[in-house]
Image (tube, rainbow, N blue to C red):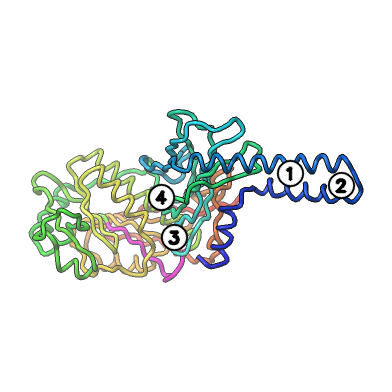
């Protein structure tokens, strides 16, 4: 934070008046000047009334701040937040049980919400409550895309006239994961159990077993650490022991988060990638529900995961939120499989060569630019999120349809609709 921004923040944090209160103060001082200049008693009366109101509310607010300085307001992030889902709230646990008639507790959430490379929304959510015993403060939230919010929560005491706002707690920093939504209307693909079962046997008995791994968790045994992969990825990786191939089938899913631009995304790139993440999670969720004994080997170009339960699908959702576009894979080796389910976007210009050189049976799920599904840009009537200039970036998504020679192509033509 620059010196100028830090100075503005301190002024706003310690200055007790809101914009309305500041305007009333200036108007009262103006009337006071007019009253002394022209001996206008009406101007003198209203100026004194305005000044007394501001001073009185400020003094009471400061007293309430000092009285409740040890009370707590804590944000509770228990339920997952889902993108494009209405009527979601964030709960603020408030230990203050009483304030005078004309005062309320306010909680403000503001910060930056990241949805892609160099793609941020500026978020602002707020609500107030009259403190009562066992009553929590709920703040309505809505997010158009999945992403990560880097927010601060501000606790304050304000009057019901909106003239004073006194912050009595330092801002609380927190990170909010907004997960991709699920949809169930997509048809599922018939899977050959023998193919997937054989794939599992091959992977378990070959050098590719190193792809059954996860990040190191304190308490893992040292002998389970895959030191070779840990050195490559520059972080500790623990081996995962999959179940017996006679009891489960392995489905290989590859997510290709590749973009021809090295540094930044545009609105349609963000839209396609968001839809793709929802598509992957929906596919996994429905497939796991229909086939509880199936396992899923997920490869993202950056990490690899073995999914075996609904809880692990939720963990994968958080990993997909963190996943941005890349120009190439950071993991060179890829496990072999007779059958692959590949998810890609219209910004993956290497997909044609990839499927042409791949001997597996490929089911290609691909989001492309088109008018079959138009997603509105203005997602909510309340403008709590302001996008940056990234929404005006020019893009050239690929409109071709690379159909696999051995397999099937499933496309979703989608674009942003501004009106």
Picture layout, residue 339 above or below residue 334: above
Q: Position of residue 227 (x, y in %)?
A: 14, 67
Determine crowd level at label 4: few under 14, some 14-19, many 20+ residues with C-alpha closer than 10 A.
some
Callout 2 secondary element: helix
Q: Is residue 151 magenta?
A: no
Which residue lies at the image location 29% right of the left edge and 63% below the top edge?
302
Q: Classify residue 341 as left or right of residue 14.
A: left
Determine crowd level at label 1: few under 14, some 14-19, many 20+ residues with C-alpha closer than 10 A.
some
Picture layout, residue 107 above or below residue 196: above
Q: Earlier in the sequence, mark 1 or mark 2?
A: 2
Q: CA distance from mark 2 to mark 4?
A: 53 Å
Q: Nearer the viewer, mark 2 or mark 4?
A: 2
Q: Are marks 3 and 1 in contact (CB under 8 Å)?
A: no
Q: Position of residue 187 (x, y in %)?
A: 34, 43
Where does label 1 land, which residue?
51
Q: Earlier in the sequence, mark 3 or mark 1?
A: 1
Q: Nearer the viewer, mark 3 or mark 1?
A: 1
Q: Which of the numbered marks, if any, corresponds to residue 176? A: 4
Q: Earlier in the sequence, mark 2 or mark 4?
A: 2
Determine crowd level at label 3: few under 14, some 14-19, many 20+ residues with C-alpha closer than 10 A.
many
Q: CA distance from mark 3 to mark 1?
A: 48 Å
Q: Earlier in the sequence, mark 2 or mark 3?
A: 2
Q: CA distance from mark 2 to mark 3?
A: 57 Å
Where does label 3 land, which residue?
116
Q: Is residue 256 magenta?
A: yes
Q: Are marks 2 and 4 in contact (CB under 8 Å)?
A: no
Q: Foreground: 287 or 409?
A: 287
Where does label 2 land, which residue?
35
Residues rendered magenta in the picture: 254-265
Q: Are marks 4 and 3 in contact (CB under 8 Å)?
A: no
Q: Nearer the viewer, mark 4 or mark 3?
A: 4
């Amino acid at each position: 934070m620059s010196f100028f921004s830090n100075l503005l923040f301190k002024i706003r944090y310690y200055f007790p008046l809101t914009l309305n209160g500041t305007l009333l103060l200036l108007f009262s001082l103006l009337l006071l000047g007019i009253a002394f200049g022209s001996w206008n008693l009406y101007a003198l009366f209203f100026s004194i009334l305005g000044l007394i109101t501001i001073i009185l509310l400020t003094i009471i607010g400061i007293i309430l701040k000092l009285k409740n300085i040890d009370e707590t307001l804590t944000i509770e992030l228990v339920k997952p937040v889902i993108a494009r889902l209405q009527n979601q709230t964030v709960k603020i646990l408030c230990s203050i049980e009483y304030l005078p008639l004309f005062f309320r507790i306010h909680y403000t959430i503001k910060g930056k919400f990241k949805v892609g490379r160099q793609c941020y929304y500026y978020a602002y959510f707020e609500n107030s409550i009259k403190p009562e015993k066992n009553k929590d403060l709920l703040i309505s939230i809505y997010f158009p895309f999945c992403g990560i919010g880097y927010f601060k929560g501000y606790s304050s005491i304000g009057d019901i006239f909106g003239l004073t706002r006194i912050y009595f707690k330092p801002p609380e920093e927190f990170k909010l994961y907004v997960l991709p939504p699920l949809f169930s209307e997509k048809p599922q693909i018939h899977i050959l159990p023998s193919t997937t079962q054989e794939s599992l046997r091959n992977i378990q008995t070959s050098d590719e077993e190193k792809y059954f791994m996860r990040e190191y968790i304190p308490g893992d045994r040292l002998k389970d650490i895959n030191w070779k992969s840990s050195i490559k990825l520059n972080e500790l990786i623990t081996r995962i022991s999959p179940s017996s191939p006679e009891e489960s089938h392995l489905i290989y899913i590859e997510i290709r988060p590749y973009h021809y631009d090295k540094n930044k995304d545009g609105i349609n790139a963000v839209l396609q990638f968001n839809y793709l993440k929802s598509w992957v999670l929906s596919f996994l969720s429905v497939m796991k529900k229909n086939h509880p004994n199936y396992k899923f080997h997920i490869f993202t170009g950056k990490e690899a995961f073995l999914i075996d339960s609904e809880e692990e699908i939720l963990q994968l959702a958080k990993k997909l939120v963190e996943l941005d576009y890349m120009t190439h894979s950071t993991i060179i080796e890829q496990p072999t499989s007779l059958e692959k389910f590949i998810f890609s976007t219209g910004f993956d210009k290497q997909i044609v060569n990839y499927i042409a050189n791949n001997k597996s049976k490929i089911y290609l799920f691909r989001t492309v630019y088109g008018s079959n599904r138009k997603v509105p840009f203005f997602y909510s009537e309340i403008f709590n999120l302001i996008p940056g200039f990234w929404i005006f970036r020019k893009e050239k998504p690929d409109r071709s349809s690379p159909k696999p020679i051995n397999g099937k192509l499933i496309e979703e033509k989608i674009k942003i609709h501004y009106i």
